[in-house]
Image (cartoon, rainbow, N blue to C red):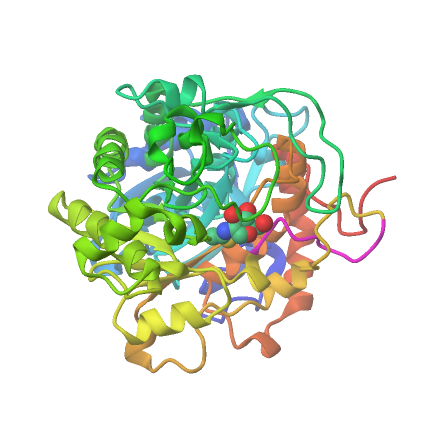
């Protein structure tokens, strides 16, 4: 079997580990026999419900001709798959249900790009697959995409669509940034004002800092608990885990607008605080009281019932401490808990939820500021302020998801041109993302084991529509997917030209999917 890339005719994204082709192809009829062994039923269901209508092919139990046979063989290992196309058809074996599913995503890439439509275009049939043998498995088991639905709400259908796009790229963690100063998005039945009040703002600042303009238009929206359960189930059928983020104790003004007692009411008039209508690091943070802990336990209790995944993200980023320094209540709490200072207070708050989640069989993950004042024992870290936080956490034996802003913040512009429709000045090109290395060189092999994966983050202060999000996210998320899945060489040795060549086919797939990606030549006039 040759190394991946020897034959790039298949243009797989992310690239598979081992690919062998001998020429020749197999033609699928309008009815194709589909057999699924134990553990492969979910992948078969996806083929029947998503791929079959796209192809205009019926997957029956009793058709003649080349067949598709799905099976599980645990010896292959987690998320791995082996895919063999012969004149008899497709044999796809996964190490587990996930592996079979990722293999079906490769099958779709072996077909023409029109296989990514939702109905067959005229002349698309007959469908052919190249005769080949592929052995594949991911480098990381956390291959993530963080979507900020708090700053600009993404209606449910848009989230479901992003799950389809993630699955096509073999990404398996959707980190949903559900709350922030500018909006609260998940329905919490015991605290109805969180969405009645906290999900809506009257106007929004246009641009980031420099602009003096507001749009004077209301904005908002929220997900009912049934919506969230639907998102989780839809993700689950694509082997994607949804990690909910409730950002505390900073980035919480929408919650304070709904329930003013959550804020530092001994130093500011929290009853007068609206859902925030502009951007940046915000001084109006939660009061570090027992009442706040109880409130958020109530929030998390409802969310644990909806989100079955192990990890729960509690934010922890950008919490200015001025109000705590000025607040007699916060100072009394510092004395009561016997912590050193305001950082210690934040650390105590995070530790509380670390224990609270652990008692319920879950794990806490937070932004790297949760290192300040001491990391809670079971906590994992999303390293966003560069690599340093992640390095420190990994050296201390904590799991890390690498997502340094300088590398994988997809709200940054993709080219320097004045015609780029993105106000953020920092540039991060597709090639930059392709050359991103999640494991810092200074970690030993044992420490590097704690880098459980990587994710791209898309913050939506200035991405005010699903179209704007598409433009920011694609094609760069395809490069991140390859970084997360494929065993790439060190950044300088990566085959950027080969990736670009494979991307030519991949753009046709994204077109068929209706993704409004940034075209390789720059924005259309
Ligand atoms: C910092 S990254 C933030 C977000 C912003 C982002 C981009 C992180 C954990 N916090 O609140 O949206 O910068 O402006």
* Residue 460 image offset from top left, x and y in percent: 59, 40
Does the magenta portion include 53? no
User: Taking 110 as reference, is 203 left or right?
Assistant: right
The residue positioned 49% from the left and 46% from the top of the image is 283
* Residue 169 image offset from top left, x and y in percent: 50, 47
Q: Which stretch did the figure color magenta?
A: 409-418
User: Taking 62 as reference, is 519 left or right?
Assistant: right
Which residue ends up furthest to the left in the rendered image?
A: 359
* Quadrant into which the N terminus falls: bottom left
* Quadrant into which the C terminus falls: top right
The residue positioned 50% from the left and 41% from the top of the image is 147
The residue positioned 85% from the left and 51% from the top of the image is 418
Does the magenta portion include 411? yes
The residue positioned 51% from the left and 40% from the top of the image is 148
Give the vertical position of 169 relative to 178 (above or below): below
* Residue 242 image offset from top left, x and y in percent: 36, 39
């Amino acid at each position: 079997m040759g190394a991946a890339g020897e034959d790039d005719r298949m243009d797989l994204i992310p690239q598979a580990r081992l690919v062998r082709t001998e020429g020749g192809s197999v033609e699928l009829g309008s009815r194709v026999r589909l057999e699924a062994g134990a553990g492969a039923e979910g992948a078969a269901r996806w083929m029947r419900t998503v791929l079959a209508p796209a192809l205009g092919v019926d997957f029956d139990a009793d058709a003649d001709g080349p067949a598709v046979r799905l099976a599980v063989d645990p010896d292959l290992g987690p998320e791995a798959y082996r895919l063999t196309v012969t004149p008899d058809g497709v044999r796809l074996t996964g190490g587990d249900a996930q592996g079979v599913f990722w293999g079906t995503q490769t099958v779709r890439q072996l077909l023409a790009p029109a296989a990514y439509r939702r109905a067959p275009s005229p002349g698309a049939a007959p469908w052919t697959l190249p005769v080949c043998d592929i052995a594949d498995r991911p480098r990381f088991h956390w291959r993530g995409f963080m979507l900020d639905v708090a700053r600009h709400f993404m209606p449910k259908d848009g989230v479901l669509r992003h799950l389809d796009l993630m699955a096509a790229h073999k990404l398996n963690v959707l980190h949903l940034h559900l709350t922030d100063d500018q909006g609260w998005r998940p329905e919490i039945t015991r605290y109805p004002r969180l969405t009645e009040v906290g999900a809506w703002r009257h106007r929004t600042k246009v641009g980031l800092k420099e602009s003096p303009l507001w749009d004077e238009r209301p904005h908002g929206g929220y997900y009912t608990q049934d919506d969230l359960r639907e998102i989780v189930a839809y993700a689950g059928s694509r082997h994607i885990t949804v990690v909910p983020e409730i950002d505390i104790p900073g980035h919480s003004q929408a919650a304070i607008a709904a329930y003013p007692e959550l804020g530092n009411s001994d130093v500011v008039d929290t009853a007068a605080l609206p859902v925030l209508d502009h951007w940046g690091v915000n001084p109006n943070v939660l009061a570090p009281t027992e009442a706040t802990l109880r409130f958020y336990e109530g929030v998390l209790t409802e969310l644990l019932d909806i989100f079955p995944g192990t990890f729960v993200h509690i934010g922890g980023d950008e919490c200015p401490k001025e109000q705590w320094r000025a607040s007699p209540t916060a100072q009394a709490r510092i004395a009561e808990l016997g912590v050193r200072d305001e950082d210690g207070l934040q650390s105590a708050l995070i530790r509380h939820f670390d224990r609270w989640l652990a008692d319920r069989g879950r794990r806490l993950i937070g932004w790297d500021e949760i290192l300040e004042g001491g990391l809670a024992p079971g906590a994992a870290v999303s390293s966003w302020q560069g690599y340093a936080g992640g390095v420190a956490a990994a050296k201390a034996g904590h799991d890390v998801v690498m997502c340094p802003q300088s590398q994988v913040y997809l709200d940054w512009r993709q080219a320097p041109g004045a015609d780029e429709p993105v106000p953020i000045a920092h540039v991060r090109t597709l090639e930059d993302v392709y050359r991103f290395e999640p494991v810092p060189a200074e970690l030993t092999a044992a420490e590097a084991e704690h880098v459980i994966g990587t994710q791209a983050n898309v913050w939506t202060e200035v991405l005010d529509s699903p179209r704007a999000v598409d433009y920011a996210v694609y094609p760069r998320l395809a490069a991140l997917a390859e970084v997360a899945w494929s065993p790439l060489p060190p950044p300088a040795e990566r085959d950027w030209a080969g990736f670009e060549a494979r991307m030519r086919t991949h753009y046709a797939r994204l077109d068929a999917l209706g993704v409004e990606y940034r075209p390789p030549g720059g924005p259309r006039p």
